Image: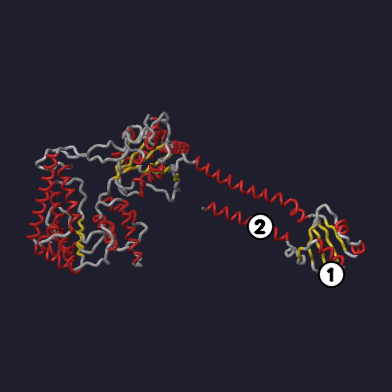
Amino acid sequence: MKNLIKNFIIFFAVFLLLAGIFSLFGGGTLTGKPKSANSDIGTLVQDINNGNVASIVVEGAKLTETLNDKSVKIIQKEDNESLSDLLKNYGVTPDKIEKINITVKNNSGSNYWLSVILPIVLPTLIIGFLIYFMMRSVAGANAKAMMFGQSGAKEFREDAKNKTTFKDVAGSEEAKEELKEVIEFLKFPKKFREIGARIPRGFLLLGAPGTGKTLMARAVAGEANVPFFHISGSEFVEMFVGVGASRVRDLFNRAKKTAPCIIFIDEIDAVGRRRGAGLGGSHDEREQTLNQILVEMDGFDGETEIIVIAATNRPDVLDPALLRPGRFDRQVVLEIPDLKEREAILKVHSEKKPLSADVDLKKIAERTSGFSGADLANLLNEAAIATAKLNEKEIKMQTIFDSIEKVMIGPERKSRVITDREKKITAYHEAGHALVAHNLKNIDPVQKISIISRGRAAGYTLKTPIEDRRLHSKEEFIEELAVLVAGRMAEKIIFNDVTTGASSDLRVATDLAKSIVTEYGMSDKLPLRTFGTSDELVFLGREMREGRDYSEKTSESIDAEVGKLFDEAVKTAVDILNNKKADLEKIVSALMIKETMEKDEFEAIVGKK
């Protein structure tokens, strides 16, 4: 579209130029000559015979007749016939001709160029312009076609002031230690070669989305001070077979010219999925691309100083050939940050943000269990946006807490109009969750209760752990089930009826109960094993097989065990709600007035946990 507009402007400018030339030299107004009118030879003869002609100017076939009254007429005659012969043929006598001042002019200067050369040059120029634009368009298309197989990797060379280093990556200390040897090799490769050591060719960064895999790769390049090529796995694959392999070759050729360097392939599972599904044919483009990556990483050339770092959150679907020694030798795991790491990440992301004196990063870290690095960065950004909306100059603690709830659950829906009955049902539902959670020893402390709608939730009860835990016991899971069903049971006890408000709780509880029985082997009646395959069926990336590896009889036993867990959870929740009914009513009364309740207000009613 831009080229079309540009070409149109050029042609329009040429048209205006030509129009100006013709108007300048073709008419008499712009040249300072008197205004003229076209005439014919018969009129000229009649004017001569009547004695009205003062002068005649002959310019080739053009006759300019000036009358006694200063008016001018233009007459065209034949090229090869002189004016005197023409007048004799029309019977004009010599004595009348002698009275007229006749001047003969030869074509020269601008008139010569216009009359002789311009008719030849102008079409040639126009045709030349057309050919030029056509050839340029074809050349552009050819250039794009030639670039089709070239890699679209972006090369980063950060300056000393703005480069990313390990100081910009909070937490993940174990991953940093693993990657420090990459930096050492890129800085001093000779030291390793002299002792006969071979540095791992590839490092695979594994972790959930948002754990900082790309940031870690850039930090490695920044620490080593080497070029950094970044490309996504999906950028290799096109609809034409062989293009991906060609781009892989081009990427590694570019990298070899700037070695030592780092190639970072983000989301490598887009091209590195397991081969052999048998559905893509022998010329599957994704497999061709993967084969070329395998060859480039560990082919005949073993002396290249290129480190390949790849990132994925789906290591289970990668081809085994990628993970063998000589290719991705090391797998570096970046986990969801713990409490200490979350505090460090918050400190990094809050450096350029004005925080008020009441902000405690440790308390924020305690309330953000399960947040990744990207989640924490987004949290502080949301708090900064909210502060700007309020026209405040500093980010306050309460604003950050509100942003936590917005990120976890969704924005407040204050405009939603609900009836008093719905509000009361929601209050009993959330109070039931909170009261049961408070009275079970393995459940995290309640931080806040709210009956203000957020996202899809009519209300919510926020619990945060005191410490991060890696292992969970069966007793914890059973108590968590009791908390999940407590909202529904509170509705049933108070109103002797149930609503759809517990649908999300029941879905989560069902998944948890199934996992207790089928994944964690915590059932007392079933054999100590897992039930069902955990492998996901990935099209063109995995062998397709049925995910169920047990009989119908075992399926009935699993259902019975899941039902038993729910019965125990319901009994636990009902017992607590009946025994603490007075506390339940106090919590609901406070919620109906204030709509939200913080930890201190809640514990003032029910006591310390």
Q: Amino acid at mark 2?
A: Leu
Q: Earlier in the sequence, mark 2 or mark 1?
A: 2
Report the residue at 67% width, 50% height from top. Answer: 123
Task: From this view, report whether residue 214 is shown above or below residue 354.
Answer: above
Q: CA gap, disc 2 to disc 1?
A: 38 Å
Q: Is residue 308 left or right of residue 406?
A: right
Is residue 288 visible in the rendered image? The answer is yes
Residue, disc 1: 68
Task: From this view, report whether residue 203 is shown above or below residue 338.
Answer: above
Instruction: Residue lying at the far right in this picture: please name it.
Output: 95
Query: 205 or 525: nearer the eye?
Result: 525
Element marked by disc 2: helix
Whole-percent x and y of residue 280? 35, 36
Give the number of the mark in front: 2 or 1: 1
Q: Is residue 236 left or right of residue 457?
A: right
Q: Is residue 437 left or right of residue 215?
A: left
Report the residue at 82% width, 66% height from top. Answer: 66
Whole-percent x and y of residue 607? 12, 62
Element marked by disc 1: loop
Whole-percent x and y of residue 378? 33, 55
> Which part of the image, by quadrant, shows the C terminus?
bottom left
Residue, disc 2: 17
Q: Amino acid at mark 1?
A: Asn
Is residue 259 visible in the rendered image? The answer is no
